[in-house]
Amino acid sequence: MVRKVKLSRKAADRLENIIAYLESEWSEKIRDEFIRKLDNALEHLSRFPASHPESDKVKGLRRYVISKQTTIYYTFTKSTVFIVTLFDNRQNPDNLKSEMR
């Protein structure tokens, strides 16, 4: 079963910021690689959302590491995968808890 993927406002804002950063500080090639990884991750999550571990930082969230810099935090139902946020792994992990408030 393929689930629909929805992004929270926070996740959409984070994604926009990541793409803008990659374009301004790196290159179109790096940006395109990130987008390809993200697309693959979202496709995988839409099919197999339970295959990734639950977060040890925020109860009820699962996590999918896209790259060493970025992790997707999400929840899911029978019909939807809801992307709560994209988290920069270089931040203090305790920031994730405060971000979820």
Image (spheres, helix red, strand yellow):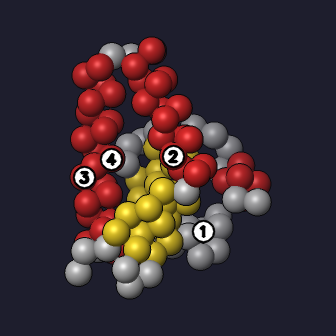
Residue type at numbered disc 4: Leu
Badge 2 marks a residue whose secondary structure is: helix
Residue 34 x %, y %: 32, 36
Badge 3 marks a residue whose secondary structure is: helix
Q: CA distance from mark 4 to mark 1?
A: 22 Å
Q: CA distance from mark 2 to mark 3?
A: 17 Å
**Could you say which disc has been placed on residue 38 in the image?**
4
Left or right of 66: which side holds 39?
left
Which mark is nearer the camera, 4 or 1? 4
Q: CA distance from mark 2 to mark 1?
A: 23 Å
The answer to the question of whether label 4 and label 3 lie on touching residues, with beta carbons closer than 8 A, is: yes
Q: N-terminal of the two: label 2 or label 3?
A: 2
Residue 38 x %, y %: 33, 47
Can residue 63 be spotted in the picture? no
Q: CA distance from mark 4 to mark 2?
A: 13 Å
Q: N-terminal of the two: label 4 or label 1?
A: 4
Which mark is nearer the camera, 2 or 3? 2
Q: CA distance from mark 4 to mark 3?
A: 5 Å
Q: Which residue is mark 2?
A: 12
Residue type at numbered disc 3: Asn
Left or right of 61: which side holds 42?
left
Which mark is nearer the camera, 2 or 1? 2
The answer to the question of whether label 2 and label 3 lie on touching residues, with beta carbons closer than 8 A, is: no
Badge 4 marks a residue whose secondary structure is: helix
Can residue 55 be spotted in the picture? yes
**Could you say which disc has been placed on residue 40 in the image?**
3
Quadrant of the image containing the N terminus: bottom left
Residue type at numbered disc 1: Asp
